[in-house]
Amino acid sequence: MKINQMDDQPVVLIIARFDSLHRGHQHLINKAKPYAESQGELAVWDLSNREPILTSLEDKLRILTDLGVERYYDHSKLKQLNCKRIVVEEDLQQEAAELYDFHDIPVTIVHQPALNHEKIQRSAIQTFVEKGQMEAAQALMGRPYQTRGTVVKGDALGRQLGFPTLNLGGIDEYVKPKPGVYLGVVEVHKETSAFYYTLISAGYRPTVNGETFKVEAYLLNFSGDLYGEEVTVSYLRHMRDEEDFDGLDVLVEQMKQDERNARMILGMPVIL
């Protein structure tokens, strides 16, 4: 993937706000691919600049590469490229024309797809995540909602309670999911990636007087130390809301029930 590279290479330029790379963006890229086969490299100009984010830049580049995109630009004002065609989503064509000189360049306007007659938009995805409706968010994104960060040291309370968790750091820029417990998957990014089913606790931990929003993941059938490792947490299903339990004993019993429920859903042996 070439990033912000300026040269004379012919390109087919896709202009959009690739803030979540949802199904609408994937549709836009697929519409541009036939032009790129004969006219130049497939390039995207990403006009998204909003926080909180739904997809990290690193994940954007990976997904775009998988979709066949060869160049990525995110300058607020892009210099003229050797552009053979512009492909732009319909709601952005006027703004794009003000930012880039379309003169003598063929332009293809792509209508945004809909799901159940509703346009696929970032705002809807963000709302679903904030309400804990992860299945609905996944339907629009075409993949689970994810947060990517680094495992940092916590207070080790989970380990003391018999449920050692990894604490995810570096995720403040992401949209915060509704406080609660989720079923998900953790990917550990090493030379060879490893995946684990997980229970995710996202929220403020009122039972232990927590004050800040944290994401902690309890990996099923895992033991070991992941401090300093980069991981991606994927949210599959909201299991229950965050609660303020009457003491740690009650919290532990609920955590055991959460694991039993998760194992039943996943078809794993129930060992508790």
Image (cartoon, helix red, strand yellow):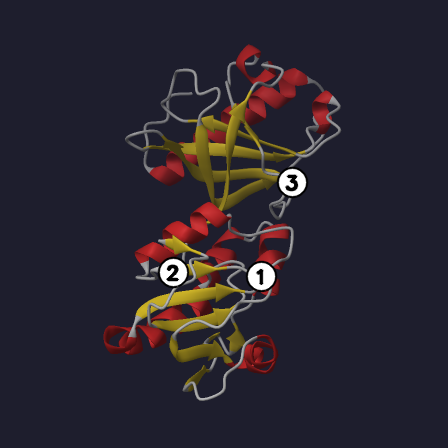
| Alpha carbons under labels 2 and 1: distance apart | 16 Å
Residue 195, picture quadrant: top left
| Residue 71: image tag | 2
Residue 64, picture quadrant: bottom left
Label 1 residue SS:
loop
Of discs 3 and 2, which sits in the foreground? Answer: 2
Give the mark, 3 or 1, whose residue is nearer the N terminus. Answer: 1
Direction top: furthest residue: 160
> In the picture provided, is 184 more to the left or to the right than 181?
left
| Alpha carbons under labels 3 and 1: distance apart | 26 Å
Give the mark, 3 or 2, whose residue is nearer the N terminus. Answer: 2
Q: What x and y, as percent, mark residue 63?
A: 38, 54
> In the picture provided, is 180 more to the left or to the right than 264?
right
The answer to whether residue 269 of the structure is visible from this angle is yes
Q: How dense is the environment of label 2, judged by Cα within 10 Å: few (below 14), some, or many (20 and up)?
A: many
Is residue 129 depicted above or below 170 in this figure?
below
Residue assigned mark 3: 179
Is residue 115 depicted above or below 70 in this figure?
below
Given the image, on which type of amino acid does mark 3 rest?
Pro
| Alpha carbons under labels 3 and 2: distance apart | 37 Å
> In the picture provided, is 46 more to the left or to the right than 67?
right
The answer to whether residue 131 of the structure is visible from this angle is no
Given the image, on which type of amino acid does mark 2 rest?
Arg
Of discs 3 and 1, which sits in the foreground? Answer: 1
Residue assigned mark 1: 48
Given the image, on which type of amino acid does mark 1 rest?
Ser
